[in-house]
Amino acid sequence: MPPTRSLLLSALVLAVAAPTLLAAPPARAQNFFERLFGIKPERPPVPPRGLPEAPAVPPPGAPGEPGQPSVPEAPRPAPVPARPVVLKAPSEESVVGQDLQLNGMSGSLKLERSGNGATARITLPGTKISQPTESCTVPLGGGNPITLSSEGKPEGVPRYEAAGAECPLRLDVTEGGVLVSTLGSGPVCTFSAADCTTTPTGLWGPAPATLVPRAGEFDTARGVADKAVRDNYKLMTQRARREDVRPIVTEQAAFSSDREQFCRGYAREGTHGFCHLRFSENRALALATRLGANTAVPTAAVTQRRSRPKPAVEGLNPDAAGGGDAIPE
């Protein structure tokens, strides 16, 4: 058949079948054109065998019904303590007669009893004004005992002041040490006649050699002290008026950085943690005092770790009588 005649015949067929194709479903119309023009239809894709079918998703139901996942609850805020947490207040006897050093390595401070009062022998460490690279020392009062005035316990711990000294100082007792700050306009005391400038602010305590063996004890006690600080701040925030909440929150946020700044100079502090512990304990007691608690009656105590028994050797129990150290109760 000539090509021209074939094309005319196809056009005639299309014209006749057009109304029917327009009304037919799309799939039927597609099959007609494929047969008309000799186009082979593509085979539908065969899904691969052996693949597991996706599990049917159950319709959503009310939470708590069988087969339905429970809705996770939002985390509840930590409960606010009902009363202030009071730690055991430090004893003055733990520092009286002890040779203490600034940051455990320089100068000297020794508290002594004098009748009903107290005195202190203090030698301040510093650097020379003319040669800042060289060290110097200044004994307050010419090396004689300085009379201290007792200021009671305004922040839960014994406080003494040496207001009449060449470098006026405030001494807050902590367990085994003294937290010292200046009463003047700044932390530095300058002694021009002695060519010496000093910064006595910090913790005056024992040398690190006596503290390192107690690092485990200090770490346990610090956990209790840090929790007491958090709980007391939380209670203060709850009791405060709305306009007084922000200063309390700001003070709490600065607590860790203040402690780090105060203790970073103590010798081997990262090994034993003595300064961090005493700073936290005194802050917890100060907060309890501000909350109106009686700091003479502690409400929190540190649980001492129980030592583990030694293993038996050759059938003998070394922890038995005469065989070794007994377990402390």
Image (cartoon, helix red, strand yellow):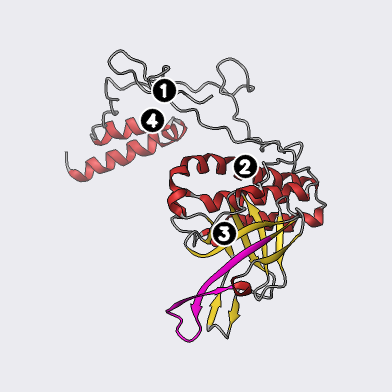
The alpha-carbon separation of the residues under discs 3 and 4 comes to: 91 Å
Q: Which residue is mark 4?
A: 27
Rendered-image quadrant of the N terminus:
top left
Crowd around label 1: few <14 · some 14–19 · many ≥20 (10 Å): few
Whole-angstrom CA distance, mark 1 to mark 4, is 86 Å
The magenta stretch spans residue 125: yes
Is 228 left, or right, of 238 in this rendering?
left
Residue 32 lies left or right of residue 149; in this view the side is: left
Judged by its main secondary structure, the magenta piece is: strand
Secondary structure at badge 4 equals helix
Mark 3 or mark 2, earlier in chain: 3
Circles 2, 1 touching at the beta carbon (< 8 Å): no
Q: Which numbered disc flags the more N-terminal residue, 3 or 4?
A: 4
> Of callouts 2 and 4, which one flags the residue occurring earlier in the amino acid sequence?
4
Q: Which residues are magenta?
A: 119-139
Q: Residue drawn 65% across and 51% down?
A: 282
Q: Amino acid at mark 4?
A: Ala
Identify the residue under disc 3: 203
Residue at position x 54%, y 24% in the image: 329
